[in-house]
Amino acid sequence: MRILAKSVGIFVPVFLVATFVTFALRSLSGLTPAHLQLGESATPETVAAIEHEWGLDRPFLTQYGDWFAGVLRGDLGVSWYNGADIASLLLQGAIISLSVAGLALVIGVIFGFGFGFLAAARRTTWVDRAITGFMTFVSVMPSFVVGIALVAVFAVGLGWFPSAGFVPAERGLGLWLAHITLPAIALSFDTVADVARQLRAGLVAAYRENYVTGAIVRGLGPRRIFFRHVLRNGMGPALSVLGLKFPALLGGAVVTESIFGMAGFGKFAADSAQRGDVPAVQGVLVVSVVVVVVFNLLVNVILARVTPASARGV
Amino acid sequence: MVLRVLRLPTGKIAFAILLVIAALALFGPLLAFQDPLEGGAGILAGPSGAHPLGTDYLGRDVLSRLLAGSRISVLGAAQVTLVAMVVGVIPGILSVYLGSVFEWLTLRLADTLIALPFLVFAVAVTALLGNGIPQAMFTVGIMVSPLFYRVTRAATLAVARSPYVEAAIVSGATIGWVVRKHVWVKVLPPIAVALAHTAGVGFVVVSSLTFLGIGVQPPAPTWGGVLAADLGYLSFRPWAPLLPTALIMATVWACNLLADAIRDVSGEGGKALITAKGVRA
C-alpha cells in the first residue's frame, strides 16, 4: 500500500506537468487543425472558423481543464486528422502493441533469466565469458537493426515468417503468433541482454555473501542454497531492470512496428506526430505515462514479495 | 586521463573508430563525390566503379548518401550528450549541498524521467515543436539526464563524506571552494563514462528517428533514411542494409568501448557509476 502511494505520488505531478507543457507548447507554436484540413488554401477567416469550431479560441486554462476532465473520464478527444475518437484508435493500436510487447517480455524473461543463470552457475568458465561477450554484443544492436536482419533472413530469405502485418488472435492463434514472433524477437534483444547481465552480477554477488558460506557450513544442499538464499537475494536488480525495460519496449515499438508494418501504438504515435495531430500525440503521452506507472507498480509489488531486502524497505 | 585511456587497446580502437566518424561528419559531405540527391540512370544497381555501394530505388549513389548523412548523426548525438550533461550534472552536485527538499525533489524527478519512454516523447515533441532533429534531441537529452544526475551525485556524496573534505570544512573552507577544489576532480571521471555511454544512446536515437523519417525532410540523406530505403527493396538488394547497419553499430560499439575504457582507468571515480543505481540516501 505504501509502495502504491509512493509510485502514484511521483507520477501524478509529472503527468500534470507533462500534459500542461504539451498544451502550452501547442498554444505557443500556433499549431491548429486548420493546417491539416485546409493545407495551402488557408485564409485567416477560414482558419479562425476552424479554430472556433474546435474551441481553440477559448482561454488556455479552460481548454486544459476541459481536456483534463475528459481524460479522467477516459475521453481523450478526437483526432485533428480524421475526427475519429482517439481513445478507441489507441485501444485498437494497443492490442497489437501489447501482443508484441507481451511476447517480447516473455522472451526477455525466459532467455534473460536462462542466460543469467547459466553464466552465474558456470561463473568464470568459458561458458560465462561466452555469454557475457555475446550479451555485450547484443546490447549494442539497435532494435531496428535486429528487425531488419530478421526480416532479411527469416521473411525474405527463408520465407518462414510473414514480413509484415498483424492478424488478430481470433483469426487463428498460429497465424497471430507467426506475425508477432519476428517483431517480438527484435524488441526483446535489449531486454534479454540487460536481464542476463544483471542477474549474473546479482547471483555472483549473492554467492559471495556470508550467509551462503554459513548455509554451506550448516550442511544445506546446493539446490536449497540456490533457491532459498542466493536466488531470492540476487534477483532483485534483474527484476528492477525488467521494470525499467517496459517503457523501452513501448519506445522500441515505435521503430519495430514501422519495420513490420503493424498499425500499433508506436506506429500511431509516429504517424500522428508526422501529421501534426496534436490531440492524438497528447493521447499517446497520457497512455504511455499510465502504462509506465502501472508496470512500475507491479514490479515493485513483486520485488517486495520476492526479495527479503526490499520488503524491509532497504 | 586521455593518455591513460589511449594506452588501453580497447581505448585505441574506440578512439580510432570515433575519429573516423568525426572526420566523416566534418568532411563527409565534401567527400561525397556524387550529388547524394541526384538520381542516376540505373536504379537499385549493384556495386560498380561509379557506385561502390550501388544505387537506391531512385538511382541515387548510396555511398554518397551515407557520407553526407554522417553529420546529422554526429551532431544529434553530440546534442543529446551536451543537453543531458548540463541538465544532469549541476543538480547532481547541488543535490548534496542544497538541503533535503531540493534533494528529494530532484531524486524523484530523476526516477520518473528515466522511467518514461524517451523515444515516444521525442516523436511527440516533433509534432509540437516542428519537425526537426534538434527539437527531438533536446527532449531526449533531458530525459536521459538522470544518468548524469545519478553518477555526479554519487561521486559528490562520496567526496563530501570523506575525512579530508570534512577536515577542510572544519578548518573554514567554504562549500564553493570544496566543490571547485575537491568535488570537481572526483566527479569528472564518472561524467566522462556517462558522456561516452550517452553518445552511444544518442546515435541509436538519431538513427531510429531518421529511419522513421522523423526530423528530416525526405530527400535529405541520413544513415537511418538509407536503411529505411534499403528495407523496401530487400528482395532486389538483400545485402544492402549491411553497410549502414555496420556503420551505426560500429559507432555505438565504439562509444560503449570508450565508456568501459574510461571506467577501467579511472578506478575509484568509475566505481561510482556502478553503484550509482543503488544511491538513495
Image (cartoon, rainbow, N blue to C red):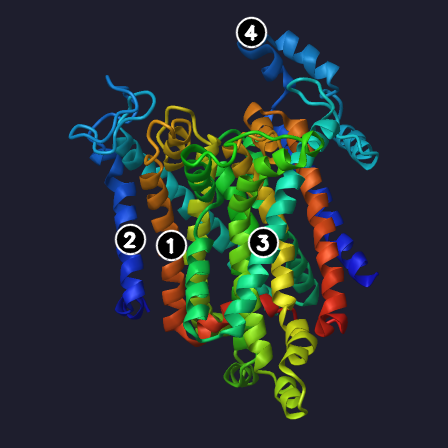
Please tell me if label 4 and label 2 are on a single chain.
Answer: no
Q: Name which quarter of the figure residue B12 lies in.
A: bottom left
Judged from the image, the secondary structure of the residue bearing numbered disc 3 is helix
Q: Hey, what amino acid is under mark 2? A: Ile
Horizontal and vertical percent position of residue A126: 41, 71
Mark 4 — on which chain does it sit? A
For image coordinates 39% across by 34% down, the residue present is B227
Check whether the beta carbons of the residues at disc 4 and disc 3 lie within 8 A of each other.
no
| Amino acid type assigned to the residue bearing label 1 in the image | Trp
Can residue B62 be seen here?
yes
Residue type at tag 4: Ser
Left or right: A129 as drawn, with respect to A16? left
Q: Which residue is mark 4?
A: A41
Q: CA distance from mark 1 to mark 4?
A: 49 Å
Which chain letter matches label 3? A
Residue sitting at x 60%, y 83%: A209
Distance between the alpha carbons at the discs numbered 3 and 1: 22 Å
Q: Chain of mark 1?
A: B
* Residue B237, horizontal then vertical, whole percent: 33, 30
- Please, what secondary structure does the residue beneath circle 1 have? helix
Give the quarter of the figure containing the N terminus of chain B.
Answer: bottom left
Q: Nearer the viewer, mark 1 or mark 4?
A: 1
Q: Which mark is residue A268?
A: none
Dot 1, crowdedness within 10 Å: few (<14), some or many (≥20)? many
In whole angstroms, how far apart are the C-alphas of marks 1 and 2? Answer: 9 Å
Instruction: Name above or below for residue A293 compared with residue A200.
Output: above
Residue B113 visible, this orientation: no
Residue placed under numbered mark 1 in the picture: B253
Locate residue B218, reporting x and y percent. Answer: 41, 24
Mark earlier in primary sequence (1, 2): 2
